[in-house]
Amino acid sequence: MEEFGGKRKLRRNRKRAAARLAKPKLVHTFDHWLRDYNAAVQNGIVGAASEEMKRVELAHEAALDEQKKKMDTMAATHKKQKEEWDAMSRSALKQVYQLGQQVAAYEESERQAAQFMVGLVDKQATMQQYIDHYQTSKKHMAQSYQ
């Protein structure tokens, strides 16, 4: 167990030493970057780069505005087309309903016509019976008078 504790202590000491050694490197790195940045500012490189960034940003914003306008136009067109589609759908449904009513009315008139025809056939049969009865009665009367 002592051996394990000794290894842990050694590892912690090494980490602390590495941290102490890393800090000066961080300070040196920042100092190096700061010197380079100041030199770039003096040479006008940073100013030119920021101007280029502004130009790119403006172009990007203009492109975004143009895309937004296109999207708005497309949304308005879509809304208009949807309204037209809804109106046409309602109109088509209304026409289908009216056609259904017309078909129902036609079927009703066909049914009534069929009933009328049945009635006519029945009346014709009855009339034929009367005619036959009349003719037989007439024959009988004629025979009885002879």
Image (cartoon, grey):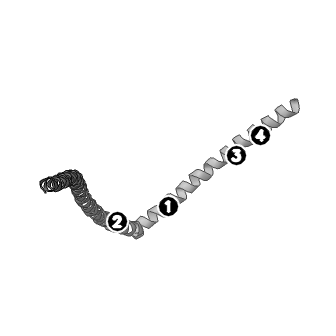
- Check the image and report above or below for 11 versus 38: above
Q: Tell whether label 1 touches label 2 (CB within 8 Å).
A: no
| Residue wearing tag 4 | 11
Residue at image x 52%, y 59%? 33
Q: Tell whether label 1 touches label 4 (CB within 8 Å).
A: no
Q: Position of residue 104 (x, y in %)?
A: 24, 52
Crowd rating for badge 2 (residues with CA inside 10 Å; few <14, some 14–19, many 20+): few
Tag in front: 4 or 2: 2
| Residue wearing tag 3 | 18
SS at mark 2 in the image? helix
SS at mark 4 in the image? helix
Q: What is the total number of numbered labels drawn onto the structure image?
A: 4
SS at mark 1 in the image? helix
| Residue wearing tag 2 | 60
Crowd rating for badge 4 (residues with CA inside 10 Å; few <14, some 14–19, many 20+): few
Which mark sits nearer the N-terminus, 4 or 3? 4
Most foreground residue, 25 or 73: 73
Q: What kind of residue is marked 3?
A: Ala
| Direction front: furthest residue | 146
Q: What kind of residue is marked 4?
A: Arg
Between marks 3 and 2, how big is the CA–CA gap?
A: 46 Å
Between marks 4 and 3, how big is the CA–CA gap?
A: 11 Å
In this view of the protein, can residue 94 be seen by the observer? no
- Residue 35's label in the rendered image is 1
Left or right: residue 32 versus residue 87 is right
| Direction top: furthest residue | 1
Q: Position of residue 19 (x, y in %)?
A: 66, 44
The C terminus appears in which quarter of the rendering? bottom left
Most foreground residue, 52 or 18: 52
Which mark sits nearer the N-terminus, 4 or 2? 4
